């Protein structure tokens, strides 16, 4: 049950993330959640301050678990993810900004630790592919549309005779 | 161009277009085969995420020892590396590749390589048991029970090994057990470079 809620909430968080402030989205979602959804494996890991815990979860959901590689540290049950969750919460409690926590992680694990990779020379194709595809497709469609279709083959003698015969009957 | 010629050209173009999916499949297959081949000979590891700590000074730490043995701090490690490059090996008693790696570490020790060990999130009693069972190749052993030093080194599993050069910088890094081939082609040359 808790697992499902966690999954559904993350899905919605990702969806709403682009429209609202993360915090607003989280508070709005709290209205729809009848049962508490714990992202941490043990509720005692959670910060007592709800706003701080929300911020820790927002940061943690952007950090890759290096063991499972396709899960965030908030979702993973790996020991390392648990340790990293604890570090995120320690730093949130110490008043460090989201950016500072992110930088701390990147200094140790590289950009790979970020689930949303930054735009750089090595990630250029990753971000630009949709636009490149649109441009290439657009050019191809434009050129294809300009070319006139090939003229049909001229009628053979037999076909011409048959046509003449049909015209006569009419 | 005559009408017949244009028509024949259109037909040919369509036939060639029908071959395009086949071409894409062939190119994809060749790329995939190359990738698998490179994985097999050890030139490509899809799980390798690199370590941004490479080339940087070792992070500060001060860790307790295992059993009656004294632990060590980053200052101890830097002082030792200044005399002779150190292989720093992270391991754990519950880690099967670490047990398999023990023989290799022992062989390196026989060759005069200085190896220091840090046990990651391990009960010191179990670490001591592991060392008595598989042999202790380490000059010094420390216990990182909370895993803080492990994270400061940018690690995500055990075993992982580093070469610490004379200036206290990380000169070489490997995620995974040291194989005879890796020792020959990676570790020993890195040690030679670090000591010169």
Image (cartoon, coloured by chain):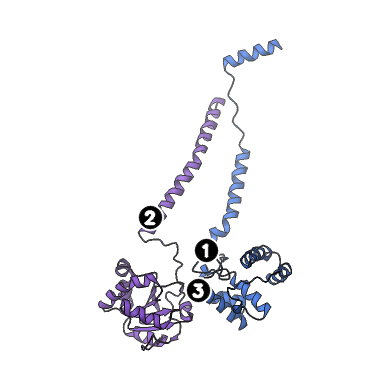
Chain colours: A blue, B purple
Is residue B4 in view from this perspective? yes
Report the side of B101 relative to A41 (left or right). left
Q: Secondary structure at mark 2?
A: helix
Residue at the far front: name it: A1
For the N terminus of chain A, the image quarter is bottom right
Residue B37's tag is 2
Q: Which mark is residue A79?
A: 3
Q: Is residue A52 left or right of residue A81?
A: right
User: Marks 3 and 1: which is nearer the front?
Assistant: 3
What residue appears at the point 58 percent right and 81 percent down from the top-left corner? A90
- Which of the labelled discs sits on residue A121, or is there none? 1
Which is nearer the N-term, disc 3 or disc 1? 3
Horizontal side of residue B59 vs A128, given as left or right: left
Q: Quadrant of residue B108?
A: bottom left
Between the C-alphas of marks 2 and 3, the distance is 33 Å
Chain to which mark 1 belongs: A
């Amino acid at each position: 049950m808790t697992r499902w809620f966690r999954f559904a909430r993350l899905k919605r968080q990702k969806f709403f993330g682009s429209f609202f402030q993360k915090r607003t989205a989280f508070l709005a979602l709290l209205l729809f959640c009848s049962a508490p959804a714990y992202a941490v494996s043990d509720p005692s890991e959670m910060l007592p301050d709800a706003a701080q815990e929300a911020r820790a979860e927002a940061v943690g959901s952007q950090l890759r678990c290096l063991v499972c590689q396709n899960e965030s540290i908030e979702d993973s049950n790996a020991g390392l993810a648990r340790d990293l969750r604890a570090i995120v919460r320690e730093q949130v409690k110490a008043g460090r900004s989201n950016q500072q926590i992110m930088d701390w992680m990147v200094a140790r694990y590289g950009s790979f630790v970020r689930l949303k990779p930054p735009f750089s020379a090595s990630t250029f194709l990753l971000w630009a592919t949709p636009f490149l595809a649109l441009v290439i497709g657009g050019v191809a469609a434009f050129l294809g549309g300009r070319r006139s279709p090939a003229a049909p083959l001229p009628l053979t003698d037999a076909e011409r005779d048959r046509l003449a015969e049909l015209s006569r009957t009419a | 161009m005559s009408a017949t010629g244009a028509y024949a050209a259109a037909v040919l173009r369509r036939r060639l277009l029908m071959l395009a999916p086949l071409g894409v499949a062939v190119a994809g297959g060749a790329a995939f085969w190359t990738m698998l081949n490179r994985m097999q000979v050890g030139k490509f590891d899809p799980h390798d995420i690199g370590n941004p700590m490479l080339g940087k000074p070792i992070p500060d730490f001060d860790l307790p020892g295992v059993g009656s043995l004294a632990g060590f701090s980053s200052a101890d490690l830097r002082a030792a590396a200044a005399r002779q490059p150190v292989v720093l090996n992270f391991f754990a008693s519950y880690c099967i590749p670490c047990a398999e790696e023990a023989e290799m570490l022992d062989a390196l020790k026989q060759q005069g390589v200085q190896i220091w060990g840090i046990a990651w999130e391990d009960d010191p009693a179990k670490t001591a048991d592991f060392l008595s069972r598989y042999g202790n190749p380490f000059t010094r052993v420390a216990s990182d029970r909370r895993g803080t030093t492990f994270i400061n080194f940018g690690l995500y599993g055990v075993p992982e090994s580093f070469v610490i050069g004379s200036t206290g910088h990380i000169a070489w890094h490997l995620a995974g057990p040291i194989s005879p081939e890796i020792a020959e082609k990676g570790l020993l040359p890195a040690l030679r470079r670090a000591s010169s």
